[in-house]
């Protein structure tokens, strides 16, 4: 989008007016001629909407809102940093939920050998505290809500701090709302433990792991491992162009088997095969029988895991109408009874494949760390 005009109000008022007029008309048209459009003038700062004619008047008298660099309300794609922050809050929430569910459901869990888990328990307990006495929201849910808000509207770091301060001053004194971006990130980062970040080629050719761990460019297409600034074409070293998140499955399966109740549920399929010829569970399917006959050794122990793998794209920034999609890969343990098999806490998020496009056939590249762990389980097993 042409933005030159927006910065020449004092030097060339004529060009400013012409540019503003063109801008307002094209926005009006691109939105399908609504009655009002959001006004980016320095006084309305996109909060208020007016008829196009008034927006043009505002722009000529007030000038454009200075900090409005990325025109996301007027057709620009959201900045990557906004997407990343949004991703971050989304992932932190997912990891957090994983831990919380594990904690809340693991009544049968033995005390963990390392301190790490009890630290996590403390953190979960803290995050689950009500925001203030009698408040239905928890510290965690409130914090994530604010952080998401920041990401969605590209609120600056200072603006975010001020917002928290303002809201905090309105809440009862005993509130535990984080008071700054720093403490927000600290709270969310605590649940970061659950996954590995693996850099990927921006064109989905390879993952920078194993032999390629220290490579700076993709051996297949030559693309830089680091982000390239679109405007200046400069490489921003240290900022990865694409990141795959892998949530290792082995420690999570271990946890599953440590829970006596769940370990027992894993043998459900053995004793509940359909008797009347109707299909109720994957155990009644031909595929299941085929596996049994092909690998009788494997079929002998009903606790051996039968896993389903699925993936579908979704847009984590729903209301930004962005075309960005990311691809979670989910593992399902078919051993469990039908009521639990597809329940939320038994769907295992294992990979988050980054967008902006669907991985297509390149999904193989991203599945690599998961397949390696699955092979390890298949060949050597887990004790
Ligand atoms: Zn205005
Ligand atoms: Zn490549």
Image (spheres, rainbow, N blue to C red):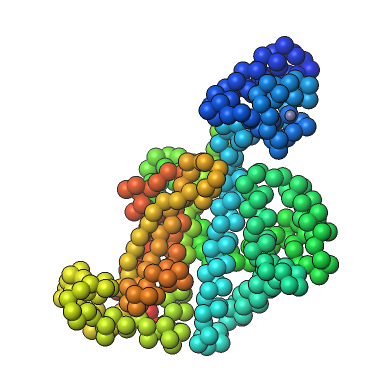
Quarter of the image with the C terminus in it:
bottom left
| Residue 336 lies in quadrant | bottom left
Is 179 situated above or below 116? above
Q: In the picture shown, does residue 294 fall above or below 54?
A: below
Q: Decide if residue 288 is in sight here.
A: no
Camera-nearest residue between 205 and 147: 147
Assign the N terminus to one quadrant of the image: top right
Q: Quadrant of residue 18?
A: top right
Relative image position of residue 354 (x, y in whole percent): 47, 50
Judged left or right of residue 172, residue 259 is left
Q: Position of residue 155 (x, y in %)?
A: 69, 45
Closer to the camera, 102 or 226? 102
- Asked whether residue 29 is in view, the answer is yes
Q: On the picture, is 103 further left or further right than 41?
A: left
- Residue under the image location 75 percent in, 63 percent down: 177
Query: Residue at point 58% right, 39% down?
Result: 78
Say which quarter of the image contains residue 289.
bottom left
Q: Quadrant of ligand 1?
A: top right
Q: Residue furthest top?
A: 14
Residue at image coords 32%, 66%: 308
Q: How many marks?
A: 0
Can you give x and y, in whole percent of width and height, for residue 83 in the image?
57, 46
Q: Nearer the viewer, residue 94 or 350?
A: 94
Q: Relative to 361, is 11 above or below?
A: above
Between 339 and 184, the one lying in front of the other is: 339
Q: Residue at x 51, y 62 (%)?
A: 196
Residue 326 percent across, percent down from the top left: 46, 50
């Amino acid at each position: 989008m042409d933005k030159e005009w927006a910065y020449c109000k004092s030097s060339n008022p004529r060009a400013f007016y012409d540019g503003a007029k063109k801008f307002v008309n094209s926005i009006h048209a691109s939105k399908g001629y609504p009655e009002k459009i959001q006004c980016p003038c320095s006084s309305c700062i996109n909060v208020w909407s007016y008829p196009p004619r008034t927006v043009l008047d505002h722009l000529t008298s007030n000038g454009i809102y200075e900090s409005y660099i990325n025109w996301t309300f007027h057709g620009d794609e959201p900045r990557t940093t906004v997407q990343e922050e949004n991703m971050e809050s989304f992932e932190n929430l997912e990891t957090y939920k994983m831990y919380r569910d594990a904690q809340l459901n693991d009544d049968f869990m033995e005390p963990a050998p390392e301190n790490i888990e009890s630290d996590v328990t403390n953190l979960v307990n803290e995050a689950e505290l009500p925001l203030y006495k009698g408040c239905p929201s928890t510290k965690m849910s409130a914090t994530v809500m604010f952080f998401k808000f920041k990401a969605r509207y590209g609120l600056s770091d200072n603006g975010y701090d001020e917002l928290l301060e303002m809201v905090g001053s309105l809440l009862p004194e005993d509130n535990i709302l984080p008071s700054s971006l720093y403490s927000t990130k600290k709270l969310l980062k605590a649940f970061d433990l659950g996954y590995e970040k693996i850099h990927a080629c921006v064109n989905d050719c390879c993952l920078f792991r194993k032999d390629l761990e220290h490579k700076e460019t993709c051996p297949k297409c030559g693309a830089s491992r680091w982000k390239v600034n679109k405007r200046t074409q400069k490489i921003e070293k240290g900022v990865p162009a694409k990141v795959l998140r892998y949530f290792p499955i082995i420690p999570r399966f271990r946890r599953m088997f440590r829970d006596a109740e769940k370990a027992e549920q894993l043998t459900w399929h053995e004793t509940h095969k359909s008797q009347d010829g109707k299909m109720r569970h994957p155990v009644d399917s031909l595929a299941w029988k085929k596996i049994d006959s092909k690998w009788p050794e494997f079929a002998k122990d009903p606790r051996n895991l039968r896993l389903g793998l699925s993936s579908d794209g979704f847009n984590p920034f729903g209301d930004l109408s962005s075309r960005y999609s990311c691809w979670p890969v989910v593992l399902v343990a078919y051993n469990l009874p039908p009521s639990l098999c597809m329940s939320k806490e038994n769907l295992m998020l294992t990979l988050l494949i980054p967008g902006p496009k669907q991985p297509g056939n390149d999904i193989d590249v991203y599945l690599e760390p998961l397949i390696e762990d699955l092979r390890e389980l298949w060949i050597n097993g887990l004790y």
